Image (spheres, rainbow, N blue to C red):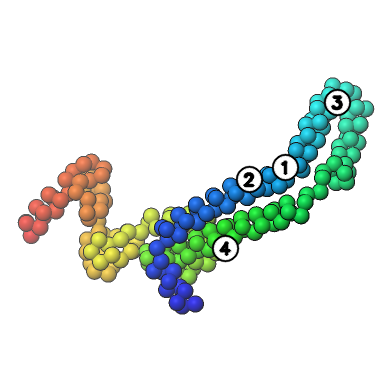
Amino acid sequence: MKKLLEKIEGADFHRPVKHLLITSVLVLLLCGVLNAFMFRTQIAEIQNYHDSQTEIIENNQINTKESQHREHDHDQEEVSIIDNSLITPPSSAAIAVGITSLVLCCACAVSYWLMVVAWLYKASSKVGLNKVLWGVLGLLTNLIALAAFFIVQSQRMQCSSCGTWQKKAPYCTSCGAQLQNLCPKCGKICSAEDAFCSHCGTALKDSNNEEEEDD
């Protein structure tokens, strides 16, 4: 288990995710085409029956309540006809294709689910969050945990000096490097690497250099 977790932390998910997406799309398309072909008789029979029932209902809508009662009785008859004799039973090959398609689609879904869990485990470890907690959240809620992770990550920043991820603060908690600057003109907080203030456009590098020279 420990080796597996170490592999997850060192894995590059760009290629596996790309391959999984391509594979899933191909599987869905192939399964859709095969099932449509194998069950074409049943699909056509259901469509024809639906069309005929729609026509009958439209004609009955202009009749009296007695006609509406007959329509209700006809709907009950519709269920028995569909269950008993209207739809041709699918062949063994069609059933096999349907089951295989279901298994393949489930395999793609499970692969996607587990990949999200693995990515959350690695990403949370990288930004200094509890990797076990985020792995469990990904396993239980998947997309909800993924969205929550991006929200939490947006509230953190990486030190350009030592690479440590931490909550947004003026200085790094690991090496003490400056992470934020105050714009001398508008007073807004800017990144330590910003050359200009994103709020008023004031040059930050020059003002920092002047302060260092004055010291």
Left or right of residue 79, residue 165 in this image: left
- State the residue in front, 105 or 91: 91
Q: In the structure shown, which secondary structural element does the residue marked by tag 2 occupy?
A: helix
Estimate the spatial distance between the alpha carbons at disc 4 and disc 1, rounded to whole Å: 38 Å
Instruction: Tell me which amino acid carries mark 3.
Output: Asn
The residue carrying mark 3 is 60
Badge nearest the viewer, 3 or 2: 2
Front disc: 4 or 2: 2
The circle drawn on residue 140 is 4
CA neighbours of label 4 inside 10 A, class few (<14), some (14 to 19), many (20+): few
Q: Residue 8 location in percent, x, y?
A: 44, 69
Q: Secondary structure at mark 4?
A: helix
Mark 3 vs 2, N-terminal side: 2
Say whether disc 4 or disc 2 marks the residue closer to the N-terminus: 2
Residue behind mark 2: 33
Residue depicted at 22% across the width and 55% down the height? 192
